[in-house]
Structures are given as structure tokens and as C-alpha cells.
Amino acid sequence: MTKTKTRFVCEECGAIQSKWAGKCAECEAWNTLVEEELQEGGPHARASLAVTSVPVPVTDTIQPSPPRLLSGMAEFDRVMGGGIVPGSLTLVGGDPGIGKSTLMLQVSHYLAMNKGAVLYVSGEESFDQARLRAGRLKTLHDRLFMLTETHVSAIAPHITQGEYKFVVVDSIQSVYTSRLAAAPGTVSQVRECASEFMRLAKSSRIPIVLVGHVTKEGVIAGPRLLEHLVDTVLYFEGEGRQSLRVLRAVKNRFGSTNEIGVFEMHDTGLGEVANPSALFLDERPLGVSGSAVFPGMEGARPLLVEVQALVSDAHAGSPRRTITGVNPNRVALLLAVLERHAGLRFCDRDVFVNVAGGIRLDEPAADLAVAVALASSLLGKPVASEVAIFGEVGLSGEVRAVSAARQRIHESAKFGFSRCIIPGNCKGDAAAANLTPEPVSKIVDAVKIALE
């Protein structure tokens, strides 16, 4: 006979408590406990698993790891750390319409053509809708199988018995298990279904990708435990009205989280951007104040991006600070340093900073380029078009050395920049590059050289 048990689960950390409380006893977050009903002993209850594994020395090489699966998209494989790991569970999130399903369908099509059968579980579209989309993207193949199902118990036998090389579940918020009385998409259902897919991936050695919705705050819907549970978390970013898309790993147990993949949306799907620096600088205006070129690093890849700044008079109330693509706190620090050590006044001006192309800069090496762009806009003097700029700025106005200076300088030289303003301690890295280094130790020196 089926028994129903009530418990309370924390939306933040996934902790389980027997009774409701205003604050979670584990993570101490307020108002995060959600009630759920758990059916025990019913027909859908999961059978207990016998312990069959034994401890193995970490140095054991009797069973070598299987090779990674290449997706046919170098940008996707770069973010995954070199390819798809068999038996891994990956979560892909992004805004509606950004291209998550398109990306997964294109990857599935390549693997079906070259590796074997692929299962695409569609919980949000009918078979006819999914087939129409596959036809538009030219991803039809007789080894790409489409399953329109939302019940985990009905999906699991296909994964374990179908001998598939790759499985996609689109989306994790649409599937459910009968063990819980909650509706699909709730915290308890998402957590329980993700745990089941994790068990299936590890036991069958089949890589499974879960497509996830995001909330209005931009994070993947469901408990935070969902991101801790999976092996890899990917975010697909970009402005839906623009064609550029950026795939970024925020968690990866099998590779670096610093790599990004750049794609461009076309009528027939996503195309790889092998040379994103050329794309980001394609529409850069010349002879205009407030624009500076920064050679950034995304993992092992150097990337040239344009940093834009606009400084204008504040006409009402407190001056505005609108920052996109850069840490706002970092920009506030740079404004204070420019006022104190370069004699530039921003306290009564509106300040707008943007990184062209939708790229997000998280490294302090972008400080000097942002500061020069701000000074250029305030003074109305354009930065020399042949100059690239990088360096970290300290509170005393000093310019500090950054990592990967040699790669940044060589990427700048490759795209025709003849001068590069760099930290003084990095001048030795510019010896073999076909450009003139401009080493500086103070931010005021960088501003003078850039605006000459």
C-alpha cells in the first residue's frame, strides 16, 4: 500500500528537514524551505541497489578511460575541455530562444552521423514540431531518434536498453517522476529527476545533456543543488536580437572553466566563429573618443575586444553609472583612481561603460583599457587606432603586470596593431612581436601615451 510522507526541502542547498522552519538549519537561508510529499512503497518506488563495486587504487590502469566524443564543433569541444566525456552529466542553460535546443540538435546530428545512435528526448515539443525544426536545421538522420516523453520511468528503459552513444533531455523542467506528488518543474521534481539521470549516466556510461530553463535573474531554474549534482554546467549567453552567441562553462569536472566558445546564429542554425577577434573589431569606429582595444584572455585563447565609454554631463540628481560587460565595482575603483592620480573629474558626470559584442570581462587586466576609454571620452580625444592596451591598475595609480602578456601582445600584432601599452614589468614579453611596446608604470602615463 502506498504511504505518503511529508518533508521540507531547502531550495538553496537541498537539505531535508522533517518540519518547517523559517531558516534552513544547514545553509541558514531564510524562507527557502518548500513542502513536498513523498510516496513510499508505491509501484514507482525505486528498488534499492545492491553493493557490487569494490575499492580500486587510484593508480589502476587496467580499465583505461574511454576516449572523449568529439561533437564536430570545435568551439563546443573547447568549452567541454576537449570533447564529451562518456558517462558525464552536463547541464546547459540560457535565456529562451538563445539557441540551446539548436546547439544540442546540431551536436546530436554530428554524433549520429559519425558515432552511432543518438536519443533526443523532447518534453516540450511534439514529434512533428521537433521534426520540422530538425528539417529546417538540416539535421535529419536515420540514427537520430526523437522521443516525446516526460515521465522519467518511461525514458529510463530507452537509455539503458537502446545502446545510444549520446542522450539529450530537453528540458529538465519538463520531466517528472511519480514518486513525488509535486508538479513538473518544482524544486523537488527537478532535483529527483536530475539524480535519476545522473544514476543512468554513470551506470550506462552514456553522456547525457540536460537542457535547463533560467529564471528572470539569469540563473538556472531549480535548486542550487542541481548545479552541484551535474559534472558540467554551461551557460549560453548573448542578446537574442543579435546573432552573436557565447558558450561559457561555469563548472567543469573534466576541464577548465576559463574557456569560451563563440557562435553566430544563422537561418540554418549555429555557425562557429573561429576568429572572434576579427568579428568583435569589425565595426570598431576609428577616430572616435571613448573607444579602446583590449587583448583579453579566455582560457588559453587571446581575444581582442573593444571597450567603449561615454562620459556626459549629469542633468538631474545623482550621476548615473551604467556598466555592461565589466564589474561595476571595478569601474568605480578606476573612476576614483583617475580622479585622484590623473586629475580627471567624474563626480558630476554620467558614466556609461560597455564591452562590444556582449563579451563579459572578469579579469583585472582590463583595468587599463577601461581607464583609458573613460579618460578619452571625458577629454574628447580619441585613442590612437593602432594602439592596444592591457594592464591592472592599483589604488596608488600604478600599473601592475598581468598573466599571459606574451599571448596578448602577439594577438595584437597579428591584427595589425603597431603599438601596445603594457605594464612596465611585461616589456620583456614583447621582444619577438612585430610591434612597438609602450611600457608604463603609472596610469597617468598610459593616458598621455594613448591620447597623444
Image (tube, rainbow, N blue to C red):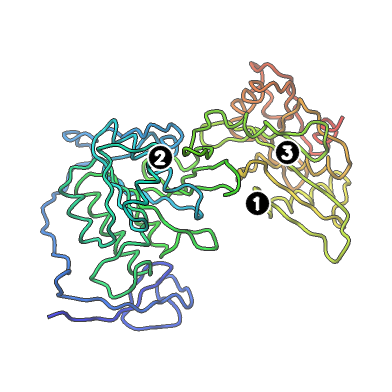
Front-most of residues 20 and 340? 20
Measured in 3D between alpha carbons, the distance from the residue under mark 2 to the one under mark 3, in whole angstroms, is 30 Å
Residue for badge 3? 369
Position of the C terminus, as image quadrant, is top right
Give the residue drawn at x 26%, y 66%: 177
Position of 64 relative to 358 (above/below): above
Q: Of tags 2 and 1, which is closer to the observer?
A: 2
- Decide which of 375, 73 is in the foreground and name it: 73
Q: How many residues crowd mark 1 within 10 Å: few (<14), some (14–19), many (20+)?
A: some
In the depicted structure, whether residue 423 falls above or below residue 344: above
Which label sits on residue 373? none
Residue hosting label 2 = 80
Q: Please state which amino acid type lies under the numbered disc 1.
A: Asn
Instruction: Pick whichever of labels 3 and 1 is earlier in the sequence.
Output: 1
Q: CA distance from mark 3 to mark 1?
A: 14 Å
| Label 1: element kind | loop
Q: How many labels were placed on the picture?
A: 3
Label 2: how many residues lie within 10 Å, few (<14), some (14-19) or many (20+)? many
- Residue in view at x 50 percent, y 55 percent: 96
Q: Nearer the viewer, residue 29 or 337?
A: 29
Upstream in the sequence, badge 2 or badge 3?
2
Circle 2 — which element?
helix
Residue 344, compared with residue 300, is above or below; it is: below
| Tag 2 near tag 3, CB within 8 Å | no
- From the top left corner, tell me how far across and down residue 323 is, in percent: 70, 52
* Residue that numbered label 1 is attached to: 327
User: What is the three-letter code of the residue carrying label 3?
Assistant: Ala
Quadrant of the rendered structure where residue 174 is? bottom left
